[in-house]
Image (cartoon, rainbow, N blue to C red):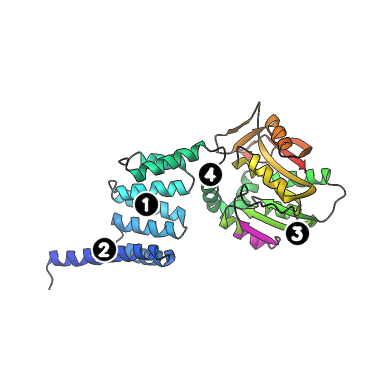
Amino acid sequence: MFSTTASARLVEGGLLSQLAASRALIEKGEPQAAVEAARETAHLYPNIAAVALALGQALMAAGHLPTAIAEFQRALRIDPALDDARFAIGCAWLEAGEAQKALEAFAQLEETPDVFAKMTQANEMLARPRSDAGYVRHLFDQFSADYDARMIGQLGYQAPRILRELADLVIQPPAKLRILDLGCGTGLSGAAFKDIAVRLDGIDLSPRMIEKARARGIYNSLKVADLETALGSDARYDLVLAADTIVYVGDVDATLAGAHRALVPDGFFLFTVEKKDGEGFELGPKRRWRHSETYLRARAAHAGFNICGFVECSPRSEAGVPVDGFALALQR
């Protein structure tokens, strides 16, 4: 029979081998296999911080960010002094676009070159005049399962209806249009415009929202992409939509320029924003950007658009209170 000490060494040796195997699978570019191996190890050793850390790293490599963060948090509950887990959760928050949470994690670590580089990245993220793409993707991946019920039932979401009514006013005569839906989400705007579309394409940052949109069966094509970088130089759409999308962008110049490139001559760009009084734009308490009328008018003209519709509206509610906003119709 083995002694207690010898048994402990064998267990430790087996565990170290399993952790190394999981890391090797990540390095080989097989993250899902790494997740399976790490889950098996976690089942055998549920209360060891290094095991939770390894599972979190495998999940993160496989793109399962929310569950990876949960495993890093579990590792720190087991061993609050595990700096590797604290660094990992800082990196995960950074990937999720949660720069402030990342800084809070990194601030508890010795400032090594790696930590300093990540803190610099987080501070740069906070200074950008738009919401980080990782934050938007993470947010809507989490909300995708019950997005429609939440938006319509709880938040009184009206942006697609408002844009359709605006389109009926400014686009005459009604015709079958080639339409691009920016930030298409689950397809609520696409559904509102499908009857006047000869072609309907959608772009969204969230892969899970794209899956929901695809299930509607109304889009000709769907792509996971960032609205600021996805639009090339091909002018092929008669109408570009952005319902409740530009609230995640402060500086609208890149979005307006992209929409202008995507539109045929005399094409339309219709979108909603949340209202800011005075000048410029600002980040609101819900991490959604607000834009002023003077700012939007000036930037639309700078981008080469004519304003053919500019109305006050309430695209949604927050805690039962209507949110003040604008709906714009721009023509190339």
Q: Which residue is most to the top? A: 278
Mark number displayed over residue 199 = 3
Identity, as a three-letter code, of the amino acid under mark 1: Phe
Looking at the rendered structure, the secondary structure element under dot 1 is helix
Residue under pointer 1: 72
Residues at circles 4 and 3 in contact by the CB criterion of under 8 Å: no
CA distance separating discs 4 and 1: 22 Å
Image quadrant containing the C terminus: top right
Q: Is residue 288 magenta?
A: no
Q: Spatial distance from mark 4 to mark 3, Cα to Cα?
A: 30 Å
Label 4 vs 1, first from the N-terminus: 1
Quote the CA–CA distance across marks 4 and 2.
37 Å
Residue in the image at 41% along x and 67% along y: 33
Q: Which residue is mark 4?
A: 132
Question: Which quadrant of the structure image shows residue 191?
Answer: bottom right
Give the mark nearest the N terminus, 2 or 1. Answer: 2
Name the residue: 27% across, 46% down: 81
In the picture as drawn, the residue positioned furthest to the right comes out as 173
Q: Nearer the viewer, mark 3 or mark 1?
A: 3
Please say if the residues under marks 4 and 2 sit with CB atoms less than 8 Å apart.
no
The answer to whether residue 130 is left or right of residue 93 is: right
The answer to whether residue 219 is magenta is: yes
Residue occupied by mark 2: 16
Spatial CA span between label 3 and label 1? 44 Å
Q: Nearer the viewer, residue 162 or 35?
A: 35
Task: Please tell me how crowded label 2 is: few (under 14), some (14-19), or many (20+) other residues with Cα within 10 Å.
Answer: some
SS at badge 4: loop
Q: CA distance from mark 2 to mark 1?
A: 18 Å
